[in-house]
Amino acid sequence: MIVYSHDTLRIFRLPDGPLQTNSYWIDTGTTSCLIDPILDPRNRPVQVSKLSLILATHGHYDHIGHADDWRAIHPVKLGIHRAENKALTDASVNLSNLTGDALEQYPAEIELHDNQKIALDANVTLQVIHTPGHSSGGVCYLVFFKGTPQALLTGDTLFAGTVGRVDLRDGDAPTLMKSLQKLVKLSSVIGEDTIVLPGHGPATTLRDEKKSNPYL
């Protein structure tokens, strides 16, 4: 389903995988970017622009499970924060070893860093925001259209009413709290009503989370 639309920009929310993780398909009108390749390629949205890039918010198995399947079909590169590139190749890092079905894939072709800007086309740019805590290399993606913020994809850092768990392999509660405060400060720059698109569950806004989320 389309969860955000502005001019030629469309963002689809596509829950998939064992934990119904939200993959997001960002269609600029000329090209597309897939966020969190847990989406089965057979569930690709119809009538969208050609896929040119895949990005992950972090390296847990429920967010990267079909990375190799997508790269086998499309000659595209995958980007993940530099702290989590091993998650693609190591089942103990992506936590799939806990499920009894070890997931080992090719490494990411692109290592991301904080504040990196990624141009999808002449109008749409993504900004990488490093938000560790749920995992060491967790990131959010801020979507700009012609230089104006439109949407914030938060992965497992921030959900509607709650936050990502910190009791996994490299989770850390104090670090996550710092990341959440980073997002609170960001809200004063991009606007509190910017739509937030989490890695699980429904959309929200920074305004609503500042009002009702106990962790903020």
Image: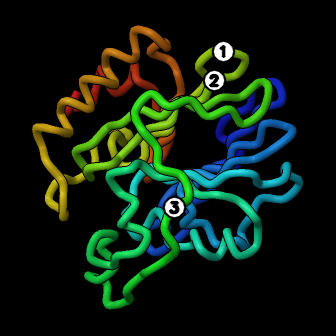
Question: Could you tell me the amino acid type at mark 3?
Answer: Ala
Question: Could you tell me the amino acid type at mark 1?
Answer: Gly
Q: Using the image, determine if residue 27 lies above or below residue 212.
A: below
The residue closer to the viewer here, 207 or 131, is 131
Residue drawn at x 48%, y 45% as measured from the top left: 202
Residue beneath disc 3: 108
Q: Reading the chain from its start, which is encountered first: label 3 or label 2?
A: 3
Question: Could you tell me the amino acid type at mark 2?
Answer: Phe
Residue drawn at x 60%, y 74% as measured from the top left: 68
Task: Determine which quarter of the picture holds residue 62.
Answer: bottom left
Give the SS element for disc 2. strand
Q: Are marks 1 and 2 in contact (CB under 8 Å)?
A: yes
Residue 92 drawn at (x, y percent): 26, 76
Residue drawn at x 50%, y 38% as measured from the top left: 153
Residue 10 drawn at (x, y percent): 75, 37
**Distance of mark 1 from mark 2, alpha carbons?**
5 Å
